Amino acid sequence: MNYKDRTGETVAAADLLPCTVCGTPTAPDSLRYYGARCFPCFQAYTRTPPKTDPRMAGVIADAGEGPLAWARRIVLRVQRQVDPPSRGALATAREALEQHDRHRRQASE
C-alpha cells in the first residue's frame, strides 16, 4: 500500500515512520517538516500555548530591559531555580555581564 506525503508524492508503506506523539505511520518528509509529528499532532501542538513556570514572570520583570536583559534573565533563572538554562547559555550570559562590567569600570577610570 502507498501513501501520499505532505507534498503529494507517493511514499511506500515500508518507508513510513511513526509520529513521536501518536504513533501514526507518517512519511519521513512530513516528520522532518512538522518536527517529528504527523500533521494533526503538529496542528494540536501549535494551538496549545506552552506551559511556563509562573515564577518566570518575576524573573522577566526583575531582569529589566536593555541590551543585557537576556543575560540577566538567564542568571536569575539559575539563582531562583526556574527552568534552568544550558551550561553554555549560562556561561555566555555570565561572560557578557562580566565584559559589560569591565567596560563600565574602564570607562569610569
Image (cartoon, grey):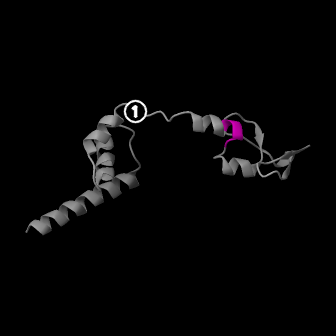
Quadrant where the N terminus lies?
A: top right
Q: Is residue 40 magenta?
A: yes
* Residue 90 x/y as whole percent: 35, 52
The magenta region covers 37-41
- The amino acid type, in three-letter code, at marker 1 is Asp
Q: Is residue 60 magenta?
A: no
Task: Name the image quarter holding residue 84.
Answer: top left
Horizontal and vertical percent position of residue 109:
7, 69
User: Which residue is drawn at the image coordinates 66% and 45% (left, top)?
Assistant: 36
Q: Is residue 17 above or below residue 21?
A: below
Looking at the image, residue 108 sits to the left or right of residue 41; the answer is left
The residue at which mark 1 appears reads as 53
Magenta span: chief secondary structure: helix
**Left or right: residue 39 compared with residue 4:** left
Crowd around label 1: few <14 · some 14–19 · many ≥20 (10 Å): few
Q: Position of residue 106 (x, y in %)?
A: 13, 68
Q: Give the residue drawn at x 65%, y 37%.
A: 43
Q: Left of 79 or right of it: where is 87?
A: right
Q: Residue at x 30, y 35 (%)?
A: 58
Mark 1 lies on a secondary structure that is: loop
